[in-house]
Image: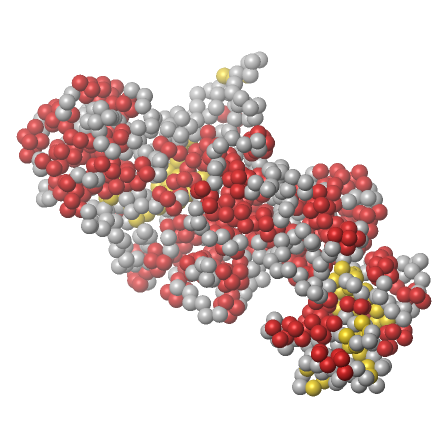
């Protein structure tokens, strides 16, 4: 594409391109029309639901025109379709060259030129036919010619997007170029376009406009009269007194035109058949529509049309405002459209429709001066980012900003740099998956969100899985799917269209077919909707994203009997509420407002049923970067925003509150959930039924069935020994350890800096920290993860309850108690040290320091940065010599 700039601007910055003749520039055009309104007495369909406006039908069907499948060098690219008020539709499309009606074709090599034009039009028509489309709008004004007679079809999708013209009240196409069968009512014959091409070539070959002064009705009669003619081209030449010229034409050109003008569609060849004609042999190796890169702006050299249009919008561009400036959108007082009279049967008598609602074939062109001015100071190096280290690049001044996400998404220069970098990373996928994760942790440019999500989920397209799945055969779930789809995000124009319903049904049936062990649960449609919306023209990517997403976050949720899985999930959710918001958790627990009453739709749909799509996107940007526990923190972040209301509400008020969830500030929700996710030890979120990539180790959490039942009855989460080691190594200042053993046991051996609170000597009847008789305990526990360590698990749970009653947050219990890190018998065994020794030898945690242990009867000796074990009275403990050191005094 070539974007023209003002003459003065070009003089100052000649390196960004020189101005070319306006009619030969690649430009972006905007046109508009109105969809047909439904009759006033037809408000509901056969299913009892409101009729979908025709403009939404156009919007849904038009998405196919924007897809990668329709990219072809002889087709102008569709960039956007906008649905406006009062059934208005706005089309944004590439406009490359000049229309054939304004192109001068000299006599020199004229017939060769006509064959060149015809060959490229046939290539475009053949590509459309292969994608299941036909033009039906082919006329000279929609054939654009470049300087070197490269051809691109324009406005070829109008017939398809309007559902064969059913969605509009105006005729599509020019009667002069319509085939006889079209005038007789045929709608879906792609050979009609071949006739139109034949009429255009005949007009050019004869050097005159056909029936230039004849009325429209007479033209229709003349076209229908061809039914009895054997050679239409010869008939046209004689009628327009060009028979000698007809006879002098090159036989190859005449043969092509006569083949196109076969009256019977059965005898008329298809585009792919005509392309094999020997008349086009001299064109087969030729390259058409090559872009002349000389004089192009940097933006054109390195960005595609869709990216340029997106940046133009960020720079303040608005197609509706542009149409208003040119008078293609006219505002009128709403009162003028009110009906004069409404009858008792519901029919209305209205004034004649305004002339502004009639079809207007004019187009306007977008002005890119504002965008070019915004990007004028960027060097060419910014268009080709080289990534040496991800952190260094992402921490550059360009990306290091504290501006809110909604502002960053509207910043033209910021989004330009993000897009340039992201294109580089996407081209290198899957080898750049780790870099993409670092990139996405900041933010994701909206046009690339669907593709980036797929990469983060590890999707690899082209494996044929989606294509092989049966998406058509009736199944027992079809009834429920058909009930759910018309209720799924129907405020969204894309998902409420017939195309959206059809695609969503195929995706749901494909997922059910691919997982015979699962059943269709209500909510799966809402879970699928974000992937479909972002990948509307790529069903395979949408399906594979869903295919990878559900096992990661909703493993086993879609079993026929999923009660155990959901119960475990909600128990863990309640435990995390106690962990992060003990005051709120106590209140909800006290009024018996349990998560089963409100949270199941949240997690079963990953909040896609709770929030509108535009809010889900930012939420899922972070969710997809996290593990299976991240949704739990989103739920807590929602409760935090409602905390003040919930604390003042009883059971009934809470039920009413969640039946119509108040507006949630999504950026706050995202930030809070991410902060909690990073702060919380992984074992605190452990679930037995989650999908674990690796089997838990000896010092990770793992439960037998009996243990699992016990954990399900607890309100306070457990911490693994492994996470305790990591906390003491990486974040020692953020950990507070309460040791409930006796003073004697604590003096003998203890975790360094732990506080001894002998459980047998304290009373927990009053919910006050000072009853524990520990000086400055409140300060010690403030903003720290409080780990309760005891010999008896029941004692640890009682102490955890006491701390929560005192409104102490971040309370957890060490799994298996102190015995998990130390046991004294005939062999002195420091299990933690032994475990870390194994890890160090395997290279997993090389350099990791052991759990510090101190005591009056034990001495820690540090040599060379490591702890070494030298037991004086027990030679059997030397198997942990490389990492742990304890010596009896």
Q: Nearer the viewer, residue 786 or 640?
A: 786
Is 457 left, or right, of 635 in this rendering? Answer: left
- Name the foreground residue: 4 vs 391: 391
Left or right: 268 as drawn, with respect to 6 = left
Note whether residue 417 is visible. Answer: no
- Toward which corner of the image does residue 685 lie, by quadrant? bottom right
Q: Residue at x 37, y 38 (%)?
A: 31
Position of the C terminus, as image quadrant, is: bottom right
Q: Nearer the viewer, residue 605 or 308?
A: 605
Q: Position of residue 407 (x, y in %)?
A: 55, 55
Q: Is residue 234 above or below residue 529?
A: above
Residue 139 image position (x, y, % from top left): 26, 33
Name the residue at the top extreme.
344
Q: Residue at x 57, y 23 (%)?
A: 48
* Residue at (57% x, 36% y) in the render: 488
Residue 226's place in the image compared with 524, above or below, is: above
Left or right of 289 in this view: 708: right
From this viewpoint, is residue 478 visible?
yes
Query: Toward which corner of the image does residue 113 lie, by quadrant?
Result: top left
Relative to 490, does residue 717 appear above or below in the rendering? below
Please report the residue visible at 57 percent of the width from the left and 31 percent of the height from the top. Answer: 476
Would residue 642 be found to the left or right of residue 449 on screen?
right
Q: Position of residue 473 (x, y in %)?
A: 49, 32
């Amino acid at each position: 594409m070539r974007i023209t700039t003002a003459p003065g601007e070009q003089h100052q910055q000649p390196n960004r391109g020189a101005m070319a003749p306006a009619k030969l520039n690649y430009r972006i055009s905007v046109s508009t029309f109105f969809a047909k309104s439904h009759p006033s007495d037809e408000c509901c369909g056969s299913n009892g639901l409101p009729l979908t406006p025709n403009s939404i039908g156009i919007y849904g069907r038009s998405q196919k025109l924007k897809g990668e499948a329709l990219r072809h060098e002889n087709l102008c690219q569709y960039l956007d379709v906008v649905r406006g008020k009062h059934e208005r539709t706005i089309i944004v499309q590439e406009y490359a060259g000049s229309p054939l009606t304004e192109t001068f074709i000299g006599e020199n090599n004229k017939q060769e030129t006509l064959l060149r034009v015809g060959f490229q039009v046939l290539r475009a028509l053949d590509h459309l036919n292969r994608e299941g489309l036909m033009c039906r709008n082919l006329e000279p004004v929609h054939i654009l010619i470049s300087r070197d007679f490269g051809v691109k079809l324009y406005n070829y999708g109008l017939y398809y997007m309007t559902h064969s013209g059913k969605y509009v009240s105006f005729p599509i196409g020019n009667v002069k170029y319509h085939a006889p069968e079209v005038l007789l009512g045929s709608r879906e014959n792609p050979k009609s376009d071949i006739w139109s091409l034949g009429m255009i070539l005949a007009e050019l070959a004869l050097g005159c406009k056909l029936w230039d002064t004849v009325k429209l009705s007479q033209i229709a009669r003349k076209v229908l009269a061809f039914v009895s003619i054997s050679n239409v081209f010869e008939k046209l030449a004689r009628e327009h007194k060009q028979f000698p010229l007809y006879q002098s034409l090159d036989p190859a050109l005449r043969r092509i035109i006569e083949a196109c003008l076969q009256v019977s569609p059965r005898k008329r060849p298809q585009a792919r058949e005509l392309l094999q004609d020997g008349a086009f042999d001299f064109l087969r190796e030729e390259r058409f529509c090559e872009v002349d890169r000389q004089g192009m702006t940097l933006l054109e050299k390195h960005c595609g049309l869709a990216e340029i249009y997106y940046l133009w919008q960020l720079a303040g561009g608005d197609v509706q405002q542009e149409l208003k400036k040119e008078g293609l959108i006219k505002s009128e007082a709403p009162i003028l459209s009110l009906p004069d009279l409404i009858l008792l049967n519901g029919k209305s008598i209205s004034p004649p429709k305004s002339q502004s609602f009639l079809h207007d074939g004019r187009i306007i062109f977008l002005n890119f001066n504002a965008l070019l001015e915004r990007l004028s100071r960027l060097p060419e190096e910014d268009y080709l980012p080289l990534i040496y280290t991800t952190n260094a690049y992402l921490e550059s001044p360009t990306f290091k900003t504290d501006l809110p996400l909604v502002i960053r998404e509207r910043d033209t220069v910021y989004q330009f740099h993000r897009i340039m970098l992201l294109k580089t990373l996407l081209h290198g996928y899957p080898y750049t998956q780790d870099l993409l994760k670092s990139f996405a942790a900041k933010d994701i440019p909206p046009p690339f969100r669907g593709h980036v999500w797929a990469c983060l989920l590890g999707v690899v397209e082209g494996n044929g899985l989606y294509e092989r799945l049966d998406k058509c055969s009736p199944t027992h779930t079809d009834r429920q799917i058909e009930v759910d789809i018309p209720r799924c995000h129907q405020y969204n124009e894309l998902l409420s269209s017939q195309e959206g319903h059809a695609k969503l049904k195929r995706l749901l049936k494909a997922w059910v077919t691919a997982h015979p062990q699962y059943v269709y649960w209500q909510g799966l449609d809402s879970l699928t909707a974000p992937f479909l919306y972002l990948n509307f023209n790529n069903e395979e990517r949408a399906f594979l994203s869903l295919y990878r997403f559900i096992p990661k976050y909703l493993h086993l949720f879609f079993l026929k009997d999923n009660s155990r899985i959901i119960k475990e999930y909600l128990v863990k959710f309640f435990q995390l509420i106690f962990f992060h918001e003990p005051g709120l958790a106590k209140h909800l627990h006290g009024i018996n407002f349990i998560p089963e009453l409100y949270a199941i739709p949240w997690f079963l749909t990953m909040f896609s049923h709770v929030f509108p799509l535009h809010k889900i996107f930012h939420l899922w940007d972070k969710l997809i970067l996290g593990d299976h526990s991240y949704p739990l923190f989103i739920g807590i972040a929602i409760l935090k925003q409602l905390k003040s209301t919930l604390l003042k509400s009883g059971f009934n008020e809470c039920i009413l509150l969640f039946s119509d969830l108040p507006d949630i500030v999504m950026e706050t929700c995202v930030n809070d959930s991410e902060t909690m996710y990073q702060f919380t030890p992984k074992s605190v979120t452990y679930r037995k039924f989650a999908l674990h990539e690796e089997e838990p180790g000896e010092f990770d959490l793992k439960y037998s069935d009996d243990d699992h039942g016990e954990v399900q009855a607890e309100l306070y989460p457990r911490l693994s020994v492994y996470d305790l080691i990591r906390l003491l190594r990486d974040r020692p200042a953020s950990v507070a350890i309460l040791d409930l053993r006796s003073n004697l046991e604590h003096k003998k051996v203890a975790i360094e800096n732990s506080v001894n609170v002998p459980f047998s000597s304290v009373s927990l009847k009053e919910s006050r920290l000072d009853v524990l008789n520990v000086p400055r305990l409140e300060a010690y526990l403030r903003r720290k993860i409080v780990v309760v360590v005891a010999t008896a698990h029941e004692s640890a749970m009682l102490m955890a309850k006491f701390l929560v009653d005192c409104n102490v947050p971040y309370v957890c219990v060490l799994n298996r108690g102190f015995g998990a890190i130390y046991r004294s018998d005939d062999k002195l065994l420091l299990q933690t040290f032994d475990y870390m020794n194994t890890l160090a030898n395997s290279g997993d945690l090389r350099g990791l320091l052991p759990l510090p242990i101190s005591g009056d009867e034990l001495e820690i000796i540090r040599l060379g940065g490591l702890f070494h074990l030298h037991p004086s009275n027990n030679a059997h403990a030397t198997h942990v010599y490389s990492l742990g050191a304890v010596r009896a005094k």
